[in-house]
Image (tube, rainbow, N blue to C red):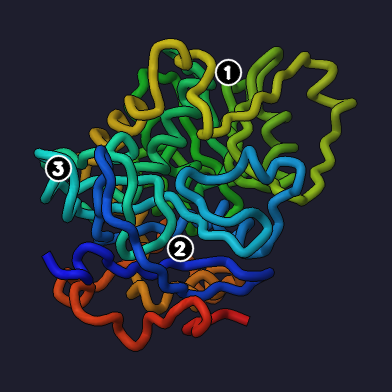
Amino acid sequence: MTTSERHPTATAYWTVGPEQGELRGEELPTPGPGEALVRTLYSGISKGTELVVHHASVPECVAGAMAAPNQEGDFPYPVKFGYLTVGVVEDGPDGWAGKTVFCLYPHQDRFIVPVESLTVIPDGVPARRAVLTGTVETAINGLWESGPRLGDRVAVIGAGLVGGMVARLLAGFPLARLQLIDVDPAKRAFAEALGVDFSHPDDALPDCDIVIHCSASQEGLQRSLQLVGDEGDIIEMSWYADRMVTLPLGEDFHARRLSIRASQVGMVARARRHRRTNAERLALAVSLLQDPVFDVFLTGSSPFAQIPGVVQRLADGTLDALCHVIEYPSRDAQSADQPAEFKSADQPTEATR
């Protein structure tokens, strides 16, 4: 084994200031007992949360609670953040080499983690589609939180990545009614691809047993209060970060005894917390991705070297996406000397300003 193989270099994407990102190089240690060296194939940009980080909008009071697994640095910046990564194990304990795995890891071309942090991707799930594992996990947690029952009337507000994922999973439930609601009429085709009914907020049907809110907008949450039935539940899956939200609590909320409950994927939903681990939740999520319908969530791709510019384009709206996939260099390219486009930490490349 050569010296470069014992101590491989890695390149990672860092947020280094408000709307500023860059690629930084680092040297990896030799994997220890129970650890694996993973070569990344794909990562996904979770637009909502990652743009909050890109804008340096994580409130200081929840900075610790909102840290991602395997994150380096602290909010607001510099921070290495991300959590939708698929790769292949190059070195590790017996039986792990060659396995394709999902990991809640930032955007980085090689990394070392304990094997307990890896979820093996089953046969029948393409590696590219498997970047959605973390988002399916979020949707599962929201459904565990909401607890839909036979014959329920359910609305999902916000036809983005998370809202669409929640609606797709709900499509398999024996509900009396399910609507995916969004202000953008172009989302109708997306809803049809998912096999669910679409509605504009003005036309949505009321008296819902459950409303799951995913639009991250004040207007969407206000409409949730109007659409849920008396003493019904609203599951809030949006993260507003440092934005203030105003609600008319003197209207539907108070008079009709409504409940708003947050769902956050960092902890297994209370209804399953004593009987499911995070690892079991991830294994369930990746198993569901054998259904090719989930490919509709993958809406574009770019090479890893371009990720700083891609994140900025997502932030300024010049690039639209549900989940944008980042593609990594081949094994031969990673095994060679560090490419010119992957500079060291003191030589950022394609930094966004």
Q: Residue at x 41, y 61 (%)?
A: 107
Q: CA distance from mark 1 to mark 3?
A: 45 Å
Q: Is residue 233 left or right of residue 132?
A: right
Q: Amino acid at mark 3?
A: Trp
**Rendered view: 337 above or below 315:** below
Mark 3 lies on residue? 96
The quadrant the N terminus occupies is: bottom left
Dividing the image into 4 quarters, which one contains the C terminus? bottom right
Circle 1 SS class: strand
Q: How many other residues sit within 10 Å of disc 2, few (<14), some (14-19) or many (≥20)?
A: some
Foreground tag (1 vs 3): 3
Give the residue displayed 68% in from the left and 61% down from the top. Answer: 56
Q: Earlier in the sequence, mark 1 or mark 3?
A: 3
Near-viewer residue (12 or 197): 12
Q: Is residue 202 visible?
A: no
Q: Position of residue 215 (x, y in %)?
A: 61, 46
Residue at horizontal 32 percent and vertical 25 percent from the top: 280
Q: CA distance from mark 2 to mark 3?
A: 33 Å
Q: Position of residue 293 (x, y in %)?
A: 26, 46
Q: Is residue 345 above or below residue 86?
A: below
Amino acid on which disc 2 is placed:
Ala
- Position of 74 with respect to 44 (left or right) is right
Residue to which mark 2 is pinned? 321
- Residue 327, label in figure: none
The residue identified by callout 1 is: 209
Residue 318 vs 257, above or below: the answer is: below
